[in-house]
Image (cartoon, rainbow, N blue to C red):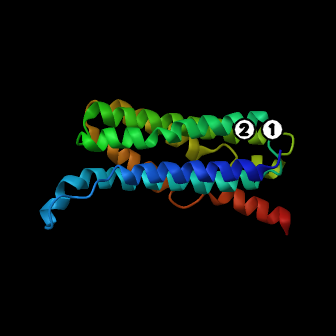
């Protein structure tokens, strides 16, 4: 199967996820700056989750650019990733609307962890695909950043029960690590096409 259909579907799902998240933010009651104060936790959680979704969208694009065709394994690995990403609006809202309480923050971390594991599985499934080339495997390499992210998510969700603000800081740190799209794939495939 051509990868275009998978990419288009994923783009649409991520767009819907972002739309659902923004709809969770309600219009403030009042016309002064104090009316915005109750929205700050919701807005900050939205920004963090929006950045995560943008990171997944960017890196998913780079990853799928590396293959010409997809098979059933890749389709299911992609659906696995999308499953965890579709829970982001729920976990974001629960965390934000409860003032970043410990359990909702930990559950948010579980969602981020499972999305990261799903992305790793998708990455490995694409590399194992017969259309994959050595340049993709070489570009991803040992994926230190991906594995470090998983370790940091595990630490954050455990620490959320001790101090949820440490967990939030770790989530923000991981997002900052990935804020610039992963250029390894772009560089390797660029050399292949020149």
What crowding class fits label 2: few (fewer than 14 Cα within 10 Å), some (14-19), or many (20 or more)?
some
The residue that disc 2 covers is 75
Image: 78 above or below 39:
above
Which of these two is toward me, 24 or 190?
24
**SS category of the residue bearing label 1:** loop
| Horizontal and vertical percent position of residue 58 | 60, 57
Q: CA distance from mark 2 to mark 1?
A: 6 Å
Query: What residue sits 52% from the left and 56% below the top?
Result: 54
Image: 194 above or below 89:
below
Query: What residue sits 24% from the left and 39% below the top?
Result: 98
Q: Is residue 52 visible?
A: no
| Horizontal and vertical percent position of residue 24 | 35, 49
Q: Is residue 188 left or right of residue 169?
A: right
Query: What residue sits 79% from the left and 43% below the top?
Result: 70
User: On residue 160, which mark appears?
Assistant: none
Numbered label tally = 2
């Amino acid at each position: 199967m051509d990868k275009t259909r998978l990419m288009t579907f994923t783009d649409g799902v991520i767009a819907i996820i972002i739309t659902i998240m923004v709809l969770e933010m309600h219009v403030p009651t009042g016309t002064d700056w104090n009316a915005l104060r109750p929205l700050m936790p919701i807005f900050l959680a939205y920004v963090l989750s929006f950045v995560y979704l943008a990171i997944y969208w960017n890196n998913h694009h780079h990853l799928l650019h590396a293959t010409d065709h997809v098979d059933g394994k890749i389709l299911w690995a992609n659906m696995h990733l999308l499953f965890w990403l579709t829970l982001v609006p729920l976990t974001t809202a629960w965390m934000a609307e409860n003032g970043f309480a410990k359990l909702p923050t930990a559950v948010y971390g579980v969602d981020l962890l499972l999305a990261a594991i799903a992305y790793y599985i998708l990455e490995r499934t694409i590399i194992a695909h017969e259309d994959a080339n050595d340049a993709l495997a070489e570009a991803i390499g040992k994926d230190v950043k991906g594995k470090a992210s998983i370790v940091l998510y595990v630490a954050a969700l455990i620490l959320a029960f001790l101090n949820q603000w440490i967990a939030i800081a770790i989530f923000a740190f991981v997002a900052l690590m990935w804020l610039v799209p992963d250029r390894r794939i772009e560089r390797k495939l660029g050399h292949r096409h020149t």
